[in-house]
Image (tube, rainbow, N blue to C red):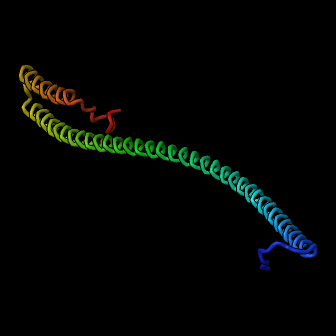
């Protein structure tokens, strides 16, 4: 629609130009209305997107809060795990100590049994010597002085045995193995 730039000469030309101008103005108004409508639609869509964004942010916040709670629970569980592991370690250490004490007691019990065995052998030897002395005494029909001398030797030997036993803190072999 290229119009010449000449000045209209007739009323009809002016009228035709006014009609064209009016049509262009209506077209501009229609385009402005269309732009306004599209702008409104875009604003509405933008508002909807903003609402969705807000909802997503709220969901994200809730998820973050749940994550925080889960992390706190994890921390508590880890702390409980650490405490349990420490208790296990302490129990294991106590178990090791008890086993060492058992081993020491077994060793002492073995030593006591060996000492008890030696005492039993010495007592058997002394009993044999006493029996020999008694037989010798009977056979020789000793005098009172000789008998008292042999008896004092016997008592001295007996004191040595019982002295050794008390020095080593050994139980009396006439009782049971543990000294009860």
Picture coordinates of residue 58, whole percent (x, y): 70, 51
| Front residue of this view, candidates 91 and 52 | 52
Give residue 98's quadrant in the image: top left
Point out residue 36 in the picture as x, y percentages from the top left corner: 82, 62
Q: Residue at x 48, y 45 (%)?
A: 84
Residue 86, quarter of the rendered image: top left
Name the residue located 14 percent from the left edge and 34 percent from the top edge.
130
9 in relation to 70, above or below = below
Query: Is residue 77 depicted above or below 31 in this figure?
Result: above
In the rendering, at what x and y percent does residue 76 appear?
55, 44
Q: Report the front residue among 80 and 100.
A: 80
Q: Quick check: 175 above or below 148?
A: below
Residue beneath the point at 68% across and 50% down? 62
Q: Quadrant of residue 108?
A: top left
**Left or right: where does residue 23 sit relative to residue 155?**
right
In the displayed structure, does residue 91 sit left or right of residue 122? right
Q: Residue at x 24, y 29 (%)?
A: 169
Q: How many marks?
A: 0
Asked whether, in this view, residue 50 is left or right of residue 77, the answer is right
Quadrant of image for the N terminus: bottom right
Between residue 124 and residue 78, name the one nearer to us.
78
């Amino acid at each position: 629609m290229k119009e010449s730039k000449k000045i209209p000469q007739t009323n009809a030309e002016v009228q035709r130009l006014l009609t064209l101008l009016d049509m262009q103005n209506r077209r501009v108004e229609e385009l402005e209305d269309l732009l306004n409508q599209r702008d409104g639609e875009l604003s509405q869509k933008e508002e909807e997107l903003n609402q969705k964004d807000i909802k997503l942010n709220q969901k994200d916040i809730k998820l973050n809060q749940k994550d925080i709670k889960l992390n706190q629970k994890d921390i508590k569980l880890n702390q409980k795990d650490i405490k349990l592991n420490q208790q296990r370690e302490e129990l294991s250490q106590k178990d090791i100590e008890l086993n060492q004490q058992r081993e020491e007691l077994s060793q002492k019990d073995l030593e006591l049994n060996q000492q008890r065995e030696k005492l039993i052998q010495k007592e058997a030897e002394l009993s044999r010597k006493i029996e020999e002395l008694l037989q010798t005494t009977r056979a020789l029909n000793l005098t009172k002085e000789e008998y008292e001398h042999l008896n004092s030797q016997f008592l001295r030997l007996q004191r040595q045995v019982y002295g050794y036993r008390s020095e080593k803190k050994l139980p009396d072999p006439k009782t049971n193995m543990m000294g009860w």
